Image: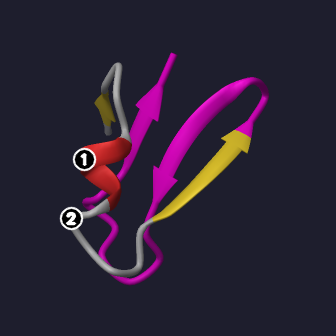
Amino acid sequence: MKVRNSLRSLKGRHRDCQVVRRKGRIYIINKTNRRFKARQG
């Protein structure tokens, strides 16, 4: 999982990427291609 300070560019990598807020952190998750995971904060 990548830790990035900006997730805007990572959301555009794949059409199934979703931005999810969990416990005050912002995550990019992708159900179909699981290597596109990222976290902010």
Indicate whether residue 24 is drawn in magenta.
yes
> Considering only vertical position in the picture, is 25 above or below 31?
above
Q: Nearer the viewer, residue 18 or 1?
A: 18
Mark 2 in CB contact with mark 1 (< 8 angstroms):
yes
Residue 10 pos. (x, y %): 27, 50
Sort mark 1 into few (<14), some (14-19) or many (20+) by Cα contacts within 10 Å: few
Residue shown at the point (29%, 58%) measured from the top left: 36
Mark 1 lies on residue: 9
Q: Does 20 sit left or right of 12 as displayed?
A: right
Q: Which residues are magenta?
A: 22-41
Residue 33 pos. (x, y %): 30, 76
Q: Which mark is residue 13?
A: 2
Name the residue furthest right.
23
> Considering only vertical position in the picture, is 6 above or below 31?
above
C-alpha separation, residue under disc 2 versus residue under disc 1: 7 Å
Q: Which picture quadrant has residue 1?
A: top left
Residue shown at the point (35%, 57%) measured from the top left: 11
Residue 18 pos. (x, y %): 52, 64
Going by the numbered disc 2, the residue's amino acid type is Arg
